[in-house]
Amino acid sequence: MQQATDFLEESRALAGLLAALSDLDFETQTQFKGWTINNIIRHLHVWNIAVDLSLQDEAAFGAFVTAMMEGVRGGKLPAFEASYLDGLSGQALLHAWLERAEAVAAAFAKADPKLRLKWVGPDMSALSSITARLMETWAHAQAVYDVLGVAREDTDRIGNIVRLGVNTWGFTWKNRRQDPPGPMPQIRLTAPSGTIWEYGEASDSGMITGSATEFCQVVTQCRNIADTSLAVTGEVAHQWMSVAQCFAGPPQDPPPAGSRCMANRGV
């Protein structure tokens, strides 16, 4: 699956960003819920392990879910993840995370895209599973790029995240126990390569145009729509961009306007 390659390339890009950091630098707090860089890489590593287990050892995956549910009861996910990894941190954590990401990519590259896999929520196809790992890696990496004051140079592999954002139009409303306020707005985005990506049909729902990167930032809730230059017309389009959520789990609200941005300088 191409998505496995895209996941690996996104992981390698983040690893390259962190390669020169000291172990102390990994304790830098980001704008994402106050998580440190260690918290973010642990989170990515633990759930890469989980998706690997879901593909290769269903019983072990079930045991992981049981341990996770018990671990977060009365606590917080980062604490469970740190405990699960025996406090692994810094460059040692980075090495372990990237090594497992390489293994996950290799396994999913050979998997049947339609294979159904267990997950914490509903079962997913292998294709959806690795696409979700790509999205999570890209989205959580944004907080790291931001705190280090580095402008990320995206590639067209973010097309996977754009499609995920489009495909979760209905999920966004269902997850909030709301009916869609109308048809999905038309979308016209400029890819990193300059290619134009278009989705949907012209309707009274309005239109969203602009940078594919910024669209991805909104649907992954890395940015508030007010902090992007996306052009949004129509009430339905405005409503969607104010609550868009392409990731699983209970409904989450986007970050407040102005709360997530790139730092003026790095660590």
Image (tube, helix red, strand yellow):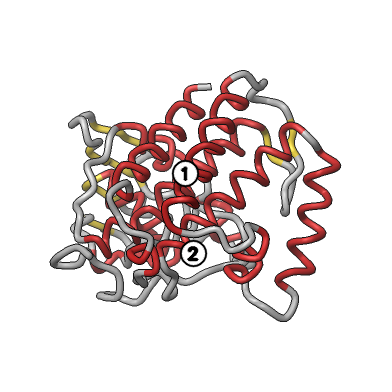
Q: Which residue is drawn at 38% across and 49% down?
A: 185
| Residue that label 2 marks | 39
Q: Which residue is drawn at 47% across and 23% down?
A: 2
Dot 2 or dot 1, earlier in sequence: 2
Spatial CA span between label 2 and label 1: 15 Å
Q: What element carries label 1?
A: helix
Disc 2 crowd rating (10 Å Cα; few below 14, some 14-19, many 20+) is many
Q: Which residue lies furthest to the left in this view?
A: 264
Q: Nearer the viewer, residue 234 or 126?
A: 126
Q: Residue 143's x, y, as percent?
A: 35, 61
Q: Which of marks 2 and 1 is in front?
A: 1
Q: Residue at x 56, y 24 (%)?
A: 106
Assign the C terminus to one quadrant of the image: bottom left
Q: In this view, does 93 lie above or below 76?
A: above
Q: Which residue is drawn at 46% across and 35% down?
A: 7
| Residue that label 1 marks | 95
Residue 247 image-quadrant placement: bottom right
Q: Nearer the viewer, residue 234 or 20?
A: 20
Q: Is residue 64 above or below residue 191?
A: below
Label 2 with label 1: CB-CB less than 8 Å: no
Q: In this view, does 34 lie above or below 140?
A: below
The kind of residue tagged 2 is Asn
- Horizontal side, residue 26 vs residue 100: left or right: left
Q: Can residue 167 be seen in this view?
A: no
Q: Residue furthest right?
A: 59
The kind of residue tagged 1 is His
Q: What element carries label 2?
A: helix
Residue 140 image-quadrant placement: bottom left
Q: Nearer the viewer, residue 95 or 106?
A: 95
**Mark number, residue 85:** none
Q: Residue 104's x, y, as percent?
A: 58, 33
Q: Residue 35's x, y, as percent?
A: 44, 70
